[in-house]
Amino acid sequence: ESTLGAAAAQSGRYFGVAIAANRLSDSTYASIANREFNSVTAENEMKIDATEPQRGQFNFTNADRIYNWAVQNGKEVRGHTLAWHSQQPGWMQSLGGSALRQAMIDHINGVMAHYKGKIAQWDVVNEAFADGNSGARRDSNLERSGSDWIEVAFRTARAADPSAKLCYNDYNVENWTWAKTQAMYRMVKDFKQRGVPIDCVGFQSHFNSGSPYNSNFRTTLQEFAALGVDVAITELDIQGASPTTYAAVVNDCLAVSRCLGVTVWGVRDMDSWRSGDTPLLFNNDGSKKQAYSAVLNALNAG
Ligand code: G3I
């Protein structure tokens, strides 16, 4: 196959991309995105601050721009994200305790109702674990509202849209030996044992010199899959875009039957949240980088 999406589809997987609504009018951007990818994540437009800027007043203008573009072009959509310490609107930042808990529940219900039956996977909870070696939860207003906030979010989400796969999503959880990875593993294991509804784990996979790719990523994917959840690579970008590292990540997904697919976090380097790292698959002029060919070859070989 000659595109990433079609190549991934040979093994029943998708190859996705993060889309920014305000770039869809850039014809180079939109034509690459449409040609190469068969899954879409909104880079910012489905987040809490975007979708509920005032409490109880939902705004899906930019989220729907991306959703409609994706569906009109035959792509599935990953929802990102419903409960997160970051990109909270001001009104939510100032809440705590039971008021915040209720606001989180209302937010999940409001957004998931709008997209009921339309989203392949939702990142229900994003980035709840602390960085470093503590293995602890990240401190946030959500965590201080009671550490059961994560399972409450998942139970709320299951009831709101039973057809969506419900994911927990985080970064620096790709290396099996890291404390953060092990903490996330213990949570997912506990959720599966207690029947908390979780279907998938998203590994963001923002690789750079501080958190480099390690070949034990495949072990991580296998260990989580063995708990009975699907896994996905949800925000892939690699500082410097090494072709061999890109191919290794794709091969890790292909090696795990429960790996649903790969999403890269932007189209061209200039579209990246860390454009100085030139971490993506396309040059700014829209041409394909060496990493693109490495990924395409890996998908076609797998
Ligand atoms: O929309 C405003 C605009 O009105 C304003 O003029 C402009 C001025 O700074 O800011 C715009 O908002 C920015 C937004 O991106 C849209 O471009 C924010 O400042 C900026 O902080 C925001 O960054 C996003 C970041 O999440 C915020 O946490 C990045 O685009 C986005 O790529 C990044 O994505 C995250 C994932 O959601 C979770 N995992 C990590 C990943 C990378 O940080």
Image (cartoon, rainbow, N blue to C red):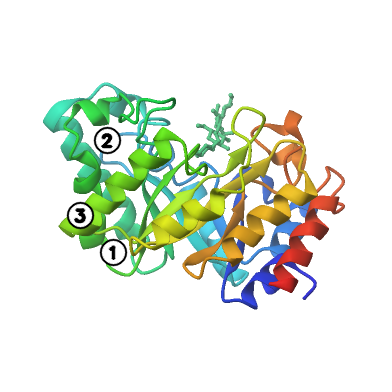
Q: Residue furthest top?
A: 94
Q: Which residue is mark 2?
A: 55
State whether residue 225 is above or below residue 170: below
Residues 181 and 293: in front is: 181
* Residue assigned mark 1: 161
Kindly report which numbered mark, 1 or 3, lies closer to the viewer in this rendering.
3
- Comes first in the chain, label 2 or label 3: 2
Residue 3 sits in which quadrant?
bottom right
Task: Please report whichever mark, 1 or 2, sits nearer to the chain's N-terminal start.
Answer: 2
Structural distance between the alpha carbons of marks 2 and 3: 22 Å
Disc 1 crowd rating (10 Å Cα; few below 14, some 14-19, many 20+) is many
Dot in front, 1 or 2? 1
Q: Quadrant of residue 31?
A: bottom right
Q: Which mark is residue 155?
A: 3
On the image, the x and y values in percent for residue 22 come to: 63, 43
CA gap, disc 1 and disc 3: 10 Å
Which disc is residue 112 wearing?
none
- The amino acid type, in three-letter code, at marker 3 is Arg
